Image: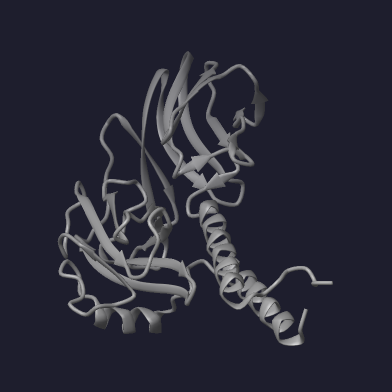
Amino acid sequence: MSTHKEYALIAILATAAVVGIMPAFALSPADTTMNSSQISPSTGSQQILPIAVSTDKSAYDRQSIVIVTGHVQNSIGGQAVTMKVSDPNGKVVEVDQITLNSNGDFQDKINTSSPLWTAGGTYTIYVQAGSQQGLLSTTTQFTLPGGGQSSCTPQQLAATTGSEMYCIDYTINGGTVSGATLDTASKALVVNIQATNDGQITLNIPRSVLDAKSGTGDSVFAVLVDGEQIQQFTETPSTDTRTITIPFQMASEKIEIIGTQIVPEFGPIAALVLAIAIISIIAVSAKTGLRFMPKY
């Protein structure tokens, strides 16, 4: 392998490592400013750009579907672009990979009623695509009304972490719920109860709030009642939620459900960034003849 090709490979791998530990994509606030001047919310760009993205409106309420559309020039059908949405505080609230059609167009839908979308203000959509010319990226923005989710319904548990609040559907018999918190350090949902009799509580926990994973598959939550771990509980997982029913005895005060992923952690982002880095290496290798093993 020639020296300049070795340097090229080292540079690519170093870039992938740096991107992998960043909480966002390769775009910095300066990049956002530059790209926002090229593409305006809801209308998209009128220029012919290597990659473009827009939304169907510039403002939405909290029970809306945001339709995201875009185009990548000189693409191959079946390739994917990676999309990330950040709230006004820079926290990632959505990550997705979208497949391009044969014309290089892509479309996705985002539901603003997600429990992660609590902040009011300007949300930024970042999209990236790998190509033989390198990584292409751009942004667009839209707004949500201020105030966030200020209260939950009587059938929902208000779980707080810092200034954020997440509403979790629940039912309980044999007692009442007096409050709940999300402990990001221990990755646990802590529910305070007042048990007047033996009973049980059922919680429909969004995976975006708390989940338990072993690799790509589900693992079992650890459940504690007043500090003692119990094994006798039932769970029904679905694509977006994990419904768990936990029995308790009279005078119980605290239930802890411990997982491996909790808001605001976003494990899938690292995997998507790594995938983008691998695509970039393959693309550059195909164009420049870069080899991973020396040719004898």
User: Extreme top residue here?
Assistant: 198
Residue situated in front as seen by the camera: 192 or 66? 66
Q: Where is residue 54 in the image (x, y as percent from the top left)?
A: 23, 66
Instruction: Tell me the quarter of the picture where residue 11 sits.
Output: bottom right
Which residue is pictured at 21% across the width and 64% down the height? 143
Residue situated in front as seen by the camera: 92 or 119? 92
- Compared with 240, 43 (above or below) is below
- Compared with 29, 172 (above or below) is above
Say which quadrant the C terminus sits in. bottom right
Residue situated in front as seen by the camera: 120 or 42? 42
Which residue is pictured at 34% across the width and 75% down the height? 50
Left or right: 65, with 221 as reference point: left
Instruction: Tell me the quarter of the picture where residue 168 sits.
Output: top left
Q: Position of residue 95 (x, y in %)?
A: 42, 55
Residue situated in front as seen by the camera: 129 or 247? 129
Q: Where is residue 80 in the image (x, y as percent from the top left)?
A: 42, 57
Q: Position of residue 140 (x, y in %)?
A: 28, 70
Which residue is pictured at 43% across the width and 33% down the height? 239
